[in-house]
């Protein structure tokens, strides 16, 4: 029998039902794979194989008596930003070191109810801010196709765990591309649902008006299956939608070939790797030969996407992250040391004032008067120690664009541009079922190569970010390999609540082989 860890959920489920394997066998096969490869890949940052085996034994009984849920056979890892009761939820940040969630996110509850098994917590960029998984307190995750390359991010662990066959499905979160881009870099399928399709209850917020939770897996059908379980209204998330869900799995089983595919010029121009461009065009031609209609569409405000996103997302982040103050949970700076430092500063200033001339004195007295109160100093020190540099950069940017005097010029304007981007898409979707684009401008690059250039890093998100600005859905599906040996992904975007259409299109690509 083939290595159990290469099975899709559907395949595993068939074998389980036929009695060819047990769920314990399956979990043990993953445990072995993890033991052998996780140290290098660094996908999991916390493992609980014991409890996975216990879950497996419970579910096995249900398989045998015919009562198992639709995800019996799903062996999953969860991005460390989604709360799982009793397990660490650190968001790969020092500020949440040792934090354990006391409740399950809605998505976890729903997966549990359908008998998915959970192996552990997955690496990510700190608070989901990043495109490579390098900004993690646990260090970078590594791309299983070439361990000198990044996985993409921020759901790097989620993509690498599937690609490295250390899970057959994972959950990630996507605020500007964080499911689709790592899926593309690691050669797996990743879907970002419409904003409001999947409950965010229990997702640690990065940018609340952009965040969505979604699945990554080996096949489009597996992604559809997981989506089916996690999607749908939840009264604990007030942005959750009441729009009914389609039967996603059914769509994938019988995909429609006669779809209208929008092709936006704006996504195939400068900055896109030529070989990626050529191979995507080849796939698009094949889809046309199969019956799809290609329709040129215009998304003229795309060029403002990155700037708009990095204003709005950082603004929301600066506000969301204000709650991490080192008092209620997570990292707290050493109080006594802080008090000693404060006292020492105060004494030094007093001493200096004694010896100062009149001119210096006023300045020093001013400094003395402005010394932090102990509580403020504790917040500052805890946050200084707890957050990494990229998160600090985002908080500063976000605070700046929200500050009086700049608010209208940045935040207000960006809100208006967001509206224009949304309108571009609405107009395009009047003519087409899906829009096709590259997922990312390049394949996975060397670990470390973009770290000193934040703007270059942000450019990676150019093709994924506008979907989050518009709140629409998108999927990345592999289309084979670049001549450099690394996976290439194609992205389909769909209008709000049109997950069926992007799944349909992705399935057609899969069927091209
Ligand atoms: N790379 C983008 C950012 O750093 C998107 C991240 C995400 O989707 N979580 O903000």
Image (spheres, rainbow, N blue to C red):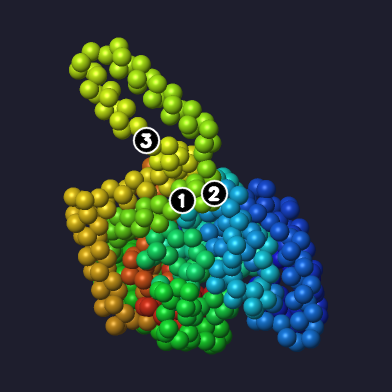
Going from N to C along the chain, the mark reached first, 3 or 1, is 1
Using the image, determine if residue 343 lies above or below residue 351. below
| Residue 495 x/y as whole percent | 36, 78
Residue 313 horizontal side relative to residue 256, left or right: left
Which mark's residue is nearer the viewer, 3 or 2?
Answer: 3
Which mark's residue is nearer the viewer, 3 or 1?
Answer: 3
| Residue 323 x/y as whole percent | 43, 53
Q: Helix or strand or loop: what does disc 1 sit on?
A: loop
| Residue 159 x/y as whole percent | 56, 60
Going from N to C along the chain, the mark reached first, 3 or 2, is 2
Going from N to C along the chain, the mark reached first, 1 or 2, is 1
Residue at 64%, 78% in the rendered image:
113
Using the image, determine if residue 479 lies above or below residue 290. above
Can I make out residue 232 in this image? yes
Q: How far apart are marks 1 and 2 (CA)?
A: 8 Å
Cβ of mark 2 under 8 A from ligand 1: no
Determine which residue is flagged by label 3. 372
Nearest to the observer: residue 39 or residue 49? 49
Residue at 27%, 24% in the rendered image:
365
| Residue 379 x/y as whole percent | 44, 43
Determine which residue is flagged by label 2. 330
Nearest to the observer: residue 2 or residue 408? 408
């Amino acid at each position: 029998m083939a290595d159990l860890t290469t099975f899709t959920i559907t395949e595993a489920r068939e074998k389980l039902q036929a009695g060819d394997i047990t769920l314990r066998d399956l979990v043990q096969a993953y445990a072995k794979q993890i033991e052998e490869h996780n140290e290098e890949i660094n996908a999991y940052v916390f493992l609980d194989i014991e409890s996975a085996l216990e879950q497996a034994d419970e579910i096995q009984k249900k398989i045998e008596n015919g009562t198992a849920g639709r995800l019996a056979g799903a062996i999953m890892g969860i991005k460390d930003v989604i709360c799982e009761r009793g397990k660490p939820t650190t968001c790969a940040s020092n500020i949440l070191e040792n934090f354990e969630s006391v409740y399950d996110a809605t998505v976890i509850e729903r997966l549990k109810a359908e008998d998915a098994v959970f192996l552990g917590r997955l690496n990510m960029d700190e608070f989901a801010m990043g495109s490579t998984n390098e900004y993690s307190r646990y260090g970078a995750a590594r791309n299983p196709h070439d361990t000198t390359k990044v996985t993409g991010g921020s759901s790097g662990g989620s993509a690498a765990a599937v690609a490295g066959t250390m899970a057959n499905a994972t959950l990630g979160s996507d605020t500007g591309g964080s499911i689709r881009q790592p899926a593309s870099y690691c050669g797996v399928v990743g879907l970002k649902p419409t904003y409001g399709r999947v409950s965010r209850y229990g997702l640690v917020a990065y940018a609340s008006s952009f965040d969505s939770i979604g699945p990554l897996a080996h096949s489009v059908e597996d992604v559809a299956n997981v989506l089916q379980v996690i999607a749908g209204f939840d009264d604990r998330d007030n942005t959750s939608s009441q729009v009914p869900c389609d039967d996603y799995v059914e769509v994938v089983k019988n995909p429609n070939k006669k779809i209208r595919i929008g092709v936006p010029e704006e996504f195939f121009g400068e900055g896109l790797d030529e070989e990626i461009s050529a191979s995507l065009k080849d796939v698009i031609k094949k889809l046309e030969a199969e019956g799809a209609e290609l329709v040129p569409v215009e998304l003229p405000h795309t060029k403002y996407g990155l700037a708009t996103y990095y204003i709005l997302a950082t603004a929301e982040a600066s506000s969301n992250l204000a709650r991490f103050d080192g008092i209620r949970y997570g990292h707290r700076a050493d109080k006594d040391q802080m008090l000693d430092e404060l006292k020492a500063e105060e004494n030094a200033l007093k001493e200096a004032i004694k010896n100062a001339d009149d001119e210096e004195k006023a300045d020093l007295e001013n400094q003395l008067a402005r010394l932090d109160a102990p509580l403020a100093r504790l917040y500052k020190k805890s946050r200084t120690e707890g957050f990494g540099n990229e998160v600090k950069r985002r908080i500063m940017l976000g605070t700046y664009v929200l500050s009086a005097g700049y608010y209208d010029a940045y935040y207000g304007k960006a809100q208006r541009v967001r509206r224009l981007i949304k309108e571009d898409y609405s107009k395009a979707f009047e003519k087409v079922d899906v829009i096709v684009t590259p997922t990312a401008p390049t394949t996975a690059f060397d670990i470390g190569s973009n770290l000193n250039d934040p703007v270059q890093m942000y450019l990676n998100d150019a093709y994924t970010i506008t979907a989050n600005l518009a709140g629409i859905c998108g999927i990345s599906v592999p289309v084979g390999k670049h001549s450099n040996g690394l996976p290439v992904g194609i992205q389909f975007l769909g209008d709000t609540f049109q997950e069926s259409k992007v799944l349909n299109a992705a399935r057609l690509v899969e069927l091209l082989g």
